[in-house]
Amino acid sequence: MKYNFFIIMILLFACNNTDVVIQVSQTDSSQKVTYEANTPKKTVFNFLKWYRFNNERINHISFIKGIGLDTITFYRIDFTQVNVFISEFQKSGFVSSAYINYLKAYFKKAEEDLVNHPQNDDVPIAFSSDLVMHTQEDLSGKSNNWDDILKSKATVEMLTPKKAMVTLDGYFKLQYLLSLVNNKWVIDSVELMYHKALF
């Protein structure tokens, strides 16, 4: 009975909101949320919502060889696992090929740094903060930080008809560059401008 009520509420919500479509799996109690991104602003906020509910799972992908083994094994990047990590962002539908290429280049540079400056303790410097949000703050799905982030004021600047910049000003100040690809806005890059907790 409760399940039927839940389905009815979702259908009513979907009929009144064209921005979000919710699909509920029959096999488990989790929700799969698919967002329609029609504007640069919606794309950014929908990406953040997606990352909020997926970042813990994604960041459990172990792409660093040697962590936790011993104190003599030097770290290396496991590019097979890196591909798994990056594929999560590709499947999200919120990022462009430019963003994917940025991630690939970041991991390649991290591997070069580990080769040139071997490390076998603590967290590798390149991964001391979240790769998407560029912060060491708690970003678990239930963290209150997300409530603050999603309340950020958004300013949209159209750079060209197919290029936009969205600046979020709140707990973090984040700047997103987006492109219109096949009539869909996708994220090219994310930059942390400042973090209010540091001021």
Image (cartoon, rainbow, N blue to C red):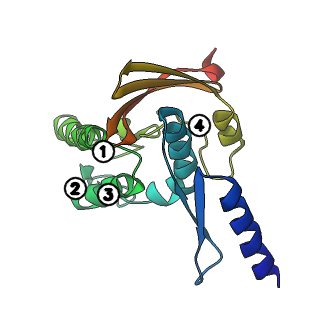
Q: Earlier in the sequence, mark 4 or mark 2?
A: 2
Note whether residue 72 is visible.
Answer: yes
Q: Is 119 situated left or right of 28 in this image?
A: left
Q: Which mark is residue 190?
A: none
Q: Eyeballing the image, is 102 above or below 157?
A: below
As shown in the figure, which amino acid type bears the numbered disc 2? Phe
At which x and y percent is residue 172?
A: 59, 26
Q: Earlier in the sequence, mark 2 or mark 3?
A: 2
Disc 1 packing (10 Å; few <14; some 14–19; many ≥20) = few
Q: Earlier in the sequence, mark 1 or mark 2?
A: 2
Q: Which residue is mark 3?
A: 87
Q: Which mark is residue 182?
A: 1
Question: Mark 1 against mark 2, which lies toward the viewer?
Answer: 1
As shown in the figure, which amino acid type bears the numbered disc 3? Ser
Give the quadrant of the C terminus: top right
As shown in the figure, which amino acid type bears the numbered disc 4? Glu
Q: Which residue is mark 4?
A: 137
Give the quadrant of the N terminus: bottom right
Question: Mark 2 against mark 3, which lies toward the viewer?
Answer: 3
Which SS class for mark 1? Answer: loop
Q: Earlier in the sequence, mark 4 or mark 3?
A: 3
Q: Earlier in the sequence, mark 1 or mark 3?
A: 3
Q: Which mark is residue 79?
A: 2
Question: Label 4 vs label 3: CA separation?
Answer: 24 Å
Question: Mark 1 against mark 4, which lies toward the viewer?
Answer: 1
- Disc 1 to disc 2: CB gap under 8 Å: no
Question: Label 1 vs label 4: CA separation?
Answer: 35 Å
